[in-house]
Structure formats: structure tokens, C-alpha cells
Image (cartoon, grey):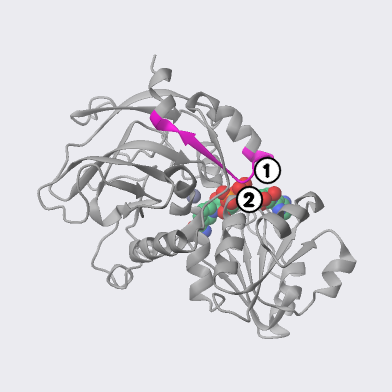
């Protein structure tokens, strides 16, 4: 007989879960495994809210199982380590991003690309190696194999650093892989949300010229003055878009909903690359002629491997890159989700789990 989430493991846990496709989150008792030899257990202090959490609680990608405890931008303090753990010790500040497992023997894993392992296990909504469902960071504590633990640099704030564990690596990895992380490159960033705003910061730190492409002219001042972008293009303004045709080496597209990509492909130089990281629930239309004319590429990219994630956060700490956040209490999460759906956040909600979760316990 399958055991209940509360009884399947020996260690009691408490968090907030969605129980159906309405996506409404509410307090939830469950359990987590004992600390294995290679496991790190930590008290969760902060957890970012990624738009993927919103897609998942509402089952927009059709892969959700309930009850679901979301959250994959998780930071906290180590409370227990297994006998074979070498990476961290009790009291260290650590994080877990989108993954908690992979096969560790395929070509991807050997290349430190666990994120592309066919057996990759997500932090929540996956079936773990012991047959139980994984639960994410909207919860009092977290446990993961040490391979999936990120060491938090001393000077990286836990709250504003948390979003880097997903939003940060998701844009850092393609900027590097697609040759855009270099001075002299002109990089477009589409969608100035959680991913987009850190993409601007990383691309600038790499020395690129950065143009934000956005539907909302209201974000112009902030993009240029606060985030440090060089140029701002309103995608709904045909004259502005026309003037920028053929000027970009690459574009990172973080848009969470279906949108036309022809105008973006037009902005690329010959051999330019449009990299999709946003994950709309329905397929986009692919305008092939615009790719043929100029040998252009449309590509995708998904988070990053563990080695690169550590490299990203160390780079961010060195270059003073962190997310711009709005810290919220646990009981605000449903309102935060409604606001996120309307892009009403500058630029990432982060839940103060450490100070506000316990009070929501029934
Ligand atoms: N590839 C990956 O590994 C990966 C990792 C994390 C998130 N994601 C996906 O990336 C997307 C963005 O995530 P986020 O957390 O930055 O979300 P977000 O809501 O913070 O930002 C999305 C941005 O897209 C803009 N946008 C929404 N609809 C639009 C439209 N129709 N046209 C133009 N702009 C529009 C919004 O204004 C907002 O600025 C989501 O789909 C998420 O699931 C992918
Ligand atoms: Zn995410």
C-alpha cells in the first residue's frame, strides 16, 4: 500500500502545497527521508518564486502531480550532513536549484550537464530514486545529495541570491554556451521579468552591449538607469524595431507566454542566435524563411549543470550581481502568484520562509 506524504518518511516536514489545477496553495504536512551518507539537510530560510512554479501549480505544461510543494530557488543553513559529505558542514549557507538527481553515468552527466540527463530528477514534481515524489522549497527544510548542493559565497545575500539558483543559471549558461558572454557582442534580452532582469546584469558583467526588448515602455527608465542596459526597444513600436533590424549577435528570450518570434529573428545579424529559455505552454510558430536568410539559429537552453551553477554564483558574488527582489511572507504566496501572472513584480518574489512559515502551521 502506498503511504501518505506524511507517513512515507521518518522526518516530519511542513510546507505549502497546491492540491489541484487551480494552483491554490495551502499549508501541508509531509515528510522527508533520513539523512543518507551523501545527503545534506538544511533549514530553508528563503525561496524564490519562479514563473515555472506558476506554470506547474496550474499544470500548464501537463506534467503536474498533486499535492505539489513548489520552489526551486532554495537557500538555507545546513543542519545535518551524512558521513561521506565533504562539500559542506553544519552551519554553512547553501542552496538547491531545480535538480536533485540524475544518472551520473551518461554522456551528459560525465560532461557536468546533469540538466540534460534523460534521468534528471527535478527538485519537485519528480519521482525520486526511492519511489517517492520530490517536494520543493516552500517548506521548512530540504534534503539533497551533496552533488546538488550549491555553496553560497559569503558576500552573497541569501534572499537576493536565491533567485540565481534558477533564474541566474538559466541565463548565464546560454550567454556563455552561445558565445554571447564577450565584450563586443550585442545581446538582446526579451521579457524583463525574473530571468530577464538578471540576464541584463550578467550580459553587462560579461562586457556585452545589451538591449532590452519589451512590450512595456514603462520599463525603459529602469532598464537603462537601474539595470544598466545600453538600449531599450519597445517591441510594439514598428519604427524602433525596424531601426534595429540585423544588429544583434544573440537574443535570450525569457517570455513566459506565446508570442511571435519573427520580429526577434529580424533583429539578428547573419549567424545570429535566438535562444529560447522561456517555456510557453503552447508551441510557437517558426518562420523558416527568416532563418534561411542569414543562416540564423533558434535554440533552447535549460538551467545549467551543477558545476556551472556553482561557477555562476561565484561569478555573481564577484561582480556584485544579485536579483532585485520583493520579500514576502508565506501567507502572501497566493496573492504573489496572481501578481506574477500579470507581470506585476519587480523583479522576483522571494518568500521569507525562515521567519514566516512556522506561523502558518494549523
Ligand atoms: N529554460 C529554463 O531552464 C527555464 C528556467 C526558469 C524559467 N523558465 C521559464 O522562463 C519563463 C520566464 O520565467 P520568469 O520567472 O522570468 O517569469 P516572469 O513572469 O518573471 O517574466 C516573464 C516576462 O515575460 C513577459 N511577458 C509575458 N507575456 C508576454 C507576451 N505575451 N509578450 C511579451 N512579453 C511577455 C512578462 O512581462 C515578464 O516580463 C517562464 O516560462 C519559465 O517557466 C525556463
Ligand atoms: Zn525556475
Q: Nearer the viewer, residue 255 or 355?
A: 355
Residue 97 against residue 318 in the figure, above or below: above
Mark 2 neighbour density, 10 Å: few (under 14) some (14–19) many (20 or more):
many
Q: What residue is pinned by disc 2?
A: 193
Q: Which residue is at 53% across, 62% downward?
A: 171
Q: Residue furthest right?
A: 239
Number of numbered discs visible in the structure rendering: 2
Q: Which residue is at 53% across, 27% downward?
A: 24
* Dot 1 beta carbon under 8 Å from ligand 1: yes
Q: Which residue is at 52% across, 46% downward?
A: 52
Part of the protein shown in magenta:
340-354
Q: What residue is pinned by disc 1?
A: 343
Q: Position of residue 137 (x, y in %)?
A: 39, 38
Q: Which residue is at 32% across, 69% downward?
A: 112
Q: Is residue 226 visible?
A: yes
* Dot 2 beta carbon under 8 Å from ligand 1: yes
Asked whether 139 falls inside the magenta stretch, the response is: no
Q: Position of residue 354 (x, y in %)?
A: 39, 31
> Sequence order check: which comes first, mark 2 or mark 1?
2
- Cα distance between the residues tagged 2 and 1: 7 Å
Q: Residue furthest front?
A: 155
Using the rendered view, name the quadrant where residue 109 is placed.
Answer: bottom left
Quadrant location of the N terminus in the rendered image = top left
Q: Position of residue 326 (x, y in %)?
A: 57, 38
Q: Position of residue 198 (x, y in %)?
A: 57, 57
* 244 left or right, relative to 28: right
Amino acid at each position: 500500500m502506498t503511504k501518505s506524504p506524511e507517513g512515507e518518511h521518518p522526518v516530519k516536514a511542513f510546507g505549502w502545497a497546491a492540491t489541484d489545477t487551480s494552483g491554490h496553495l495551502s499549508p501541508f504536512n509531509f515528510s522527508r527521508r533520513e539523512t543518507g551518507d551523501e545527503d545534506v539537510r538544511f533549514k530553508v530560510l528563503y525561496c524564490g518564486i519562479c514563473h515555472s512554479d506558476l506554470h506547474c501549480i496550474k499544470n500548464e505544461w501537463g506534467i503536474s502531480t498533486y499535492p505539489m510543494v513548489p520552489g526551486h530557488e532554495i537557500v538555507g543553513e545546513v543542519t545535518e550532513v551524512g558521513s561521506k559529505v565533504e562539500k559542506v558542514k553544519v552551519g554553512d549557507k547553501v542552496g538547491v536549484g531545480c535538480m536533485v538527481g540524475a544518472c551520473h553515468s551518461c554522456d551528459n552527466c560525465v560532461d557536468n550537464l546533469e540538466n540534460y540527463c534523460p534521468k534528471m530528477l527535478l527538485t519537485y514534481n519528480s519521482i525520486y530514486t526511492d519511489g517517492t515524489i520530490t517536494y520543493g522549497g516552500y517548506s521548512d527544510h530540504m534534503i539533497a545529495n551533496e552533488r546538488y548542493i550549491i555553496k553560497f559565497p559569503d558576500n552573497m545575500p541569501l534572499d537576493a541570491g536565491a533567485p540565481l539558483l534558477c533564474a541566474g543559471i538559466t541565463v548565464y549558461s546560454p550567454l556563455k554556451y552561445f558565445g554571447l558572454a564577450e565584450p563586443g557582442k550585442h545581446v538582446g534580452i526579451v521579457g524583463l521579468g525574473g530571468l530577464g532582469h538578471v540576464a541584463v546584469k550578467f550580459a553587462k558583467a560579461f562586457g556585452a552591449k545589451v538591449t532590452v526588448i519589451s512590450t512595456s515602455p514603462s520599463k525603459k527608465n529602469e532598464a537603462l538607469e537601474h539595470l544598466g542596459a545600453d538600449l531599450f526597444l519597445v517591441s510594439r513600436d514598428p519604427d524602433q524595431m525596424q531601426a534595429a533590424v540585423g544588429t544583434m549577435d544573440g537574443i535570450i528570450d525569457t517570455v513566459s507566454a506565446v508570442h511571435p518570434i519573427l520580429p526577434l529573428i529580424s533583429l539578428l545579424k547573419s549567424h545570429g542566435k535566438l535562444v529560447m529559455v522561456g517555456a510557453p505552454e503552447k508551441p510557437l510558430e517558426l518562420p523558416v524563411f527568416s532563418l534561411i536568410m542569414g543562416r540564423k539559429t533558434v535554440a533552447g537552453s535549460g538551467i545549467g549543470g551543477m558545476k556551472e551553477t556553482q561557477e555562476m554564483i561565484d561569478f555573481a558574488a564577484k561582480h556584485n550581481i544579485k536579483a532585485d527582489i520583493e520579500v514576502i511572507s508565506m501567507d502572501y504566496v497566493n496573492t504573489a502568484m496572481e501578481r506574477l501572472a500579470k507581470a506585476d513584480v519587480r523583479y522576483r518574489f522571494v518568500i521569507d520562509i525562515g521567519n514566516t512559515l512556522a506561523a502558518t502551521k494549523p
